[in-house]
């Protein structure tokens, strides 16, 4: 084998280890699962919207609208009373939305004014799901509008081009929890909410990756610089060593992340400034107790991440190896962060929900959307899970700190045999 | 009371037996050397005694304290200097000694410990430079100072003068000897036979995880008609 070949194979054998491959393979499997889960959205988009319909208009165009909507949607509720219709919408019995066509719909159009249609949505999800449902209903209403335009042209009813182009005015109202947000469709509301929901996952990911890599690197440095043995023979409890390292990394990680967040905060405030929807007006802004829940969730997720990193750090051999050890933690933080950008927790398929919930960093990432949608039980469950996970991983880290493995690492049997053989042969008896 | 009592000590790494029933006793104020080839079990034995590794079998007491049951109490009495130990590179020598002395309060005065550490290290103005700028000899002096400044009841020194030139090694040996006169018991391992003969009151020869001979260096040389300890060892393992 040539010199180039020898160096090539040495590098490949050094770099292509199970430690490098396993996290990548796991990630590929996870992303494939997520792809399958989100792949269903296309099929969902092609399905007809399910709506509830109330037509108070007894005119011809009212009836025309019924025929048009019947063709473009699946009408699961047909009613006559608006209040009753709203109640069925909130009970989930009138599909994705309730479409209300008032009694003056035909007369307005005949008199040269646009017909007015009101659509009521019950927002049960954020992210893609929210946009999907309102998008499908919006599409059906666009079809209705086009059908009316077409009928007006065919019947040569009017020469008012503006009316022909826009024969219908749609007003949207969204019910979110017990709040009624008038004049806003779910996709519009979601666009505003997601600005806030986007920032927390980013904070979580930054803090976990930064503080976590500090913990792992700290352990790698202790081993590489041969300072760990001295530290372990000092009269200090191993628990304090573990907690001291975790606390130090947490503080530094938070400081570094806060610096990042100042920049992101400016970015967020400039985005929020352009929004026309005032969440506070509709009672949808987060309260102090909500921020407390998010803070607790964030703190516990940070503890989980640091304790996990400490465990990984125990197995690291040196600073270089420590760098690759951060990969699994980074991946664990990235999975829920990406998902949170597209969907809320409740809208995820069951297996993905289980996977996401099992990742302790998910709890704060989904906290804002869960609070917004009123799923406080999920927020509290996430906090409880994180508390249990953090306690268990910290106890495991302390336990490992008291074991030989901290210093000896994982000794492969072949290495042991070589080590033993060298000792027995005593070939080179003395070093000097 | 014996400073160290090791009885039938075994240490296994899975199926590999690194130490196979080592027994020896060290008296208070004595300098005791563990001598043997690479992989014989010297460092493993020292690491067990330093509370770093768990005992697989046998028993160890240090000043009457059981190592397995009372490790935290043992750590208050010992100081361990590993062969290839390092110090925190981003600290200055002075800061490193301050950092270590802080762990021994309130039982000991940290200022006194620091003062003593500075004396032993004898790095003059370089003590205020970062450790990463030190030569190997300077770092070793700092680490010896760290180990001895706390006036431990037992100093466990693995390859005390590893990597030091003759003059630095001699100075370090002098410092350790001076420490024993103040009552510190020393357990050391070394490949340097001259060092062993110069420093140790008694030695134990270890081979393949077992003590194969022990006694004062002079008595062992006489017993095997050898001119130095290396010859003694070769005779013993033949």
Image (cartoon, helix red, strand yellow):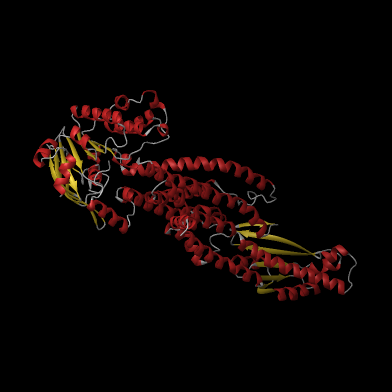
Q: Mark yes or no: residue A14 visible.
A: yes
Left/right of residue A424 with respect to residue A396 in the rendered view? left
- Which of the two residues, B55 or A159, is positioned nearer the viewer here? B55
Considering only vertical position in the picture, is A346 above or below B42? Answer: below
For residue B105, what is the image quadrant? top left
Left/right of residue A269 with respect to residue A236 in the rendered view? right
Q: Position of residue A241 (x, y in %)?
A: 35, 42
- Quadrant the C terminus of chain A occupies: top left
Q: Mark yes or no: residue A94 visible.
A: no
- Which of the two residues, B3 or B186, is positioned nearer the viewer here? B186
Considering only vertical position in the picture, is A36 above or below A321? Answer: below
Q: Position of residue A7 (x, y in %)?
A: 47, 54
Which residue is the extreme one toward the left? B223
Q: Position of residue A123 (x, y in %)?
A: 61, 61
Considering only vertical position in the picture, is A159 above or below A224? Answer: below
Q: How many marks?
A: 0
Left/right of residue A272 with respect to residue A422 in the rendered view? right
Q: Position of residue B75 (x, y in %)?
A: 25, 39
- Which of the two residues, A43 or B144, is positioned nearer the viewer here? B144
Left/right of residue B147 with respect to residue A367 in the rendered view? left
Q: Which residue is at 71% across, 75% downward?
A: A70
Considering only vertical position in the picture, is A363 above or below B235? Answer: below
For residue A64, what is the image quadrant? bottom right
For residue B89, what is the image quadrant? top left
């Amino acid at each position: 084998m040539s010199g180039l070949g020898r160096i090539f194979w040495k590098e490949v054998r050094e770099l292509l280890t199970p430690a490098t491959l396993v996290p990548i393979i796991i990630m590929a499997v996870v992303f494939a699962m997520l792809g399958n889960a989100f792949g269903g959205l296309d099929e969902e988009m092609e399905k007809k919207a399910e709506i509830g319909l109330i037509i108070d208009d007894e005119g011809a165009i009212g009836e025309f609208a019924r025929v048009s909507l019947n063709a473009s949607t699946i009408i699961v509720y047909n009613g006559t009373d608006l209040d009753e219709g709203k109640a069925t919408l909130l009970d989930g019995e009138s599909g994705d939305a309730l479409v209300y066509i008032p009694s003056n719909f035909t007369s307005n159009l005949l008199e040269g004014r646009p017909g007015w249609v009101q659509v009521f949505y019950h927002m049960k999800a954020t992210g893609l799901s929210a946009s999907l449902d309102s998008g499908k209903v919006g599409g059906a209403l666009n079809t209705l509008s086009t059908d009316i335009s077409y009928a007006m042209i065919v019947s040569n009813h009017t020469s008012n081009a503006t009316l022909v182009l826009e024969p219908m005015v749609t007003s949207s109202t969204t019910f979110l929890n017990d709040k009624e947000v008038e004049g806003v469709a779910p996709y519009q509301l979601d666009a505003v909410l997601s600005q806030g929901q986007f920032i927390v996952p980013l904070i979580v990911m930054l803090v976990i990756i930064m503080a976590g890599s500090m913990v792992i690197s700290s352990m790698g440095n202790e081993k590489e610089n041969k300072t760990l043995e001295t530290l372990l023979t000092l009269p200090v409890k191993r628990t304090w060593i573990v907690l001291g390292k975790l606390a130090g990394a947490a503080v530094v990680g938070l400081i570094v992340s806060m610096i990042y967040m100042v920049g992101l905060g400016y970015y967020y405030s400039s985005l929020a400034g352009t929004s026309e929807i005032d969440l506070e007006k509709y009672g949808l802004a987060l309260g102090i107790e909500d921020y407390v829940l998010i803070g607790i969730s964030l703190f516990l997720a940070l503890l989980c991440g640091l304790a996990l990193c400490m465990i990984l750090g125990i197995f690291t051999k040196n600073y270089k190896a420590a760098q690759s050890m951060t990969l699994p933690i980074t991946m664990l933080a990235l999975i829920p962060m990406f998902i949170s950008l597209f969907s809320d927790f409740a809208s995820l398929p069951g297996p993905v929900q289980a996977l996401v919930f099992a990742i302790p960093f998910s709890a704060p990432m989904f906290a804002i959307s869960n609070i917004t949608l009123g799923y406080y039980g999920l927020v509290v469950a996430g906090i409880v899970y994180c508390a249990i996970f953090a306690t268990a991983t910290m106890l495991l880290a302390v336990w490992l700190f008291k074991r030989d493995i901290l210093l000896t690492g994982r000794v492969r049997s072949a290495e042991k045999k070589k080590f033993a053989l060298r000792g027995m042969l005593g070939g080179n008896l003395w070093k000097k | 009371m014996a400073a160290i009592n090791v009885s039938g000590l075994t240490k296994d790494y899975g199926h590999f037996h690194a130490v196979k029933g080592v027994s020896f006793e060290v008296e208070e104020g004595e300098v005791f050397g563990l001598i043997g080839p690479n992989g014989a079990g010297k460092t493993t034995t020292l690491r067990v005694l330093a509370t770093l590794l768990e005992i697989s079998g046998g028993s160890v007491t240090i000043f009457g304290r059981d190592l397995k049951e009372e490790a935290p109490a043992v750590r208050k009495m010992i100081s361990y200097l590993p062969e290839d130990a390092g110090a925190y590179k981003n600290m200055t020598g002075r800061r490193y000694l301050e950092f270590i002395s802080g762990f021994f309060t309130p039982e000991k005065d940290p200022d006194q410990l620091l003062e003593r550490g500075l004396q032993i290290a004898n790095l003059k103005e370089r003590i205020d430079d970062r450790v990463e700028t030190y030569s190997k000899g300077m770092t070793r002096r700092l680490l010896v100072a760290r180990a001895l400044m706390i006036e431990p009841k037992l100093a466990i020194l693995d390859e005390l003068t590893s990597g030091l030139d003759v003059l630095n090694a001699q100075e370090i040996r002098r410092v350790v000897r001076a420490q024993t006169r103040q009552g510190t018991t020393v357990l050391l391992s070394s490949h340097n036979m001259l060092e062993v003969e110069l420093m140790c009151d008694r030695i134990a020869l270890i081979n393949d995880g077992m003590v194969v001979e022990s006694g004062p260096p002079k008595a062992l040389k006489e017993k095997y008609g050898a001119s130095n300890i290396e010859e003694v060892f070769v005779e013993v393992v033949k």
